[in-house]
Amino acid sequence: MPSSTRYQLLCVCACLLLSMSVSASVVVDTTRLIYPALEREISLRLSNSGGQPALVQTWIDDGNVDAKPDDVDVPFVVMPPIARINQGKGQSLRIAYTPRAGIPKDRESVFWLNVLDVPPLPSGQVSNHMQMAFRTRLKLFFRPADLPGSAIDSAQKLRWGLAKSSNGTVLQVRNDGAFHVSFSSVEVKLDDGRSFNVQSHMLAPRSSADFAFEQALTSSTAAGRVIYQWINDYGSTVRAESKLQF
């Protein structure tokens, strides 16, 4: 038997010998959180849909996915930071804002809530067991009071156009509003009948961004329109359309 085939067979056998826990049991009841500045606190419900207890650790970071809970420096407190949730039960998290300097008052800020689900070790004598923890990250939008407009206005009043960059033609989008806009899909349809999908991401307030085309677009002067799906405060997608304006 060739050595490469023997190696592949050993890998398969090793995988079969491992007892793996690969499903998260803790369910979060939303996909994003909005924190109005005038609220004393907001809450989030977690539930354990699995067949065994789970240990949950929660913390908030400022966008650094590798930041450890003890190292983050954000203006929020999550209570409780660690909780045991029995099977079939739930746990409410309370998030409180602690005012501090440096947080913009004329636009939204975004932070990230982390929910780490650590399943318990199996009872009895178990060998070759691989224990896996699952982390969920949710966007937490801090929304100052008296912001002009609304999240809907920011999403619907985006300005789109084609522009040249070092990587070729890109789709440029400008957000003049005070709210973040998150996309689930963006597509450009040119007047000549061609369509192009775009690699999109969240757009910060009062900013612009260049979105790359999944397939190369050679012209930066073509006429057409942009069809995009953005995500509202409730996690639902909303369809919108705009002409290429510049």
Image (cartoon, rainbow, N blue to C red):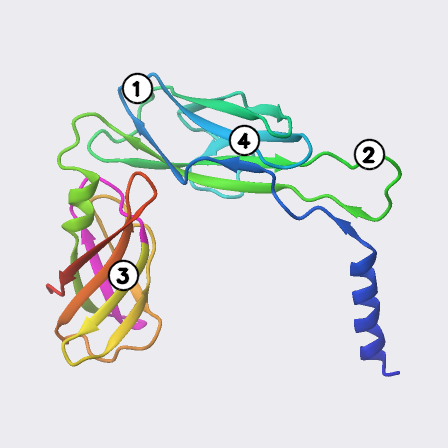
Please report whichever mark, 1 or 4, sits nearer to the chain's N-terminal start.
Answer: 1
Q: Which residues are magenta?
A: 164-183
The magenta stretch spans residue 222: no
Asked which secondary structure carries label 1, the reply is loop
What is the C-alpha distance between the residues marked 4 and 2?
A: 23 Å
- Disc 4: CA contacts within 10 A as few (<14), some (14-19) or many (>=20): some
Please report whichever mark, 4 or 3, sits nearer to the chain's N-terminal start.
Answer: 4
Q: Amino acid at mark 3?
A: Asp
What is the C-alpha distance between the residues marked 1 and 2?
A: 44 Å
Image position of 62 (left or right of 157):
right
Q: Amino acid at mark 2?
A: Ser
Q: Nearer the viewer, residue 88 or 42?
A: 88
Please report whichever mark, 3 or 1, sits nearer to the chain's N-terminal start.
Answer: 1
Asked which secondary structure carries label 3, the reply is strand
Quadrant of the image for the N terminus?
Answer: bottom right
Write down the residue under mark 4: 47
Picture disc at residue 39: 1
- Are circles 4 and 3 on residues that touch, CB within 8 Å? no
Write down the residue under mark 2: 123
- Are circles 4 and 2 on residues that touch, CB within 8 Å? no
Image position of 219 (left or right of 10):
left
Write down the residue under mark 3: 210
- Residue 200 placement: quadrant: bottom left
* Residue displayed at 50% across by 43% down: 65
- Are circles 3 and 1 on residues that touch, CB within 8 Å? no
What is the C-alpha distance between the residues marked 4 and 3?
A: 39 Å
Q: Amino acid at mark 1?
A: Glu
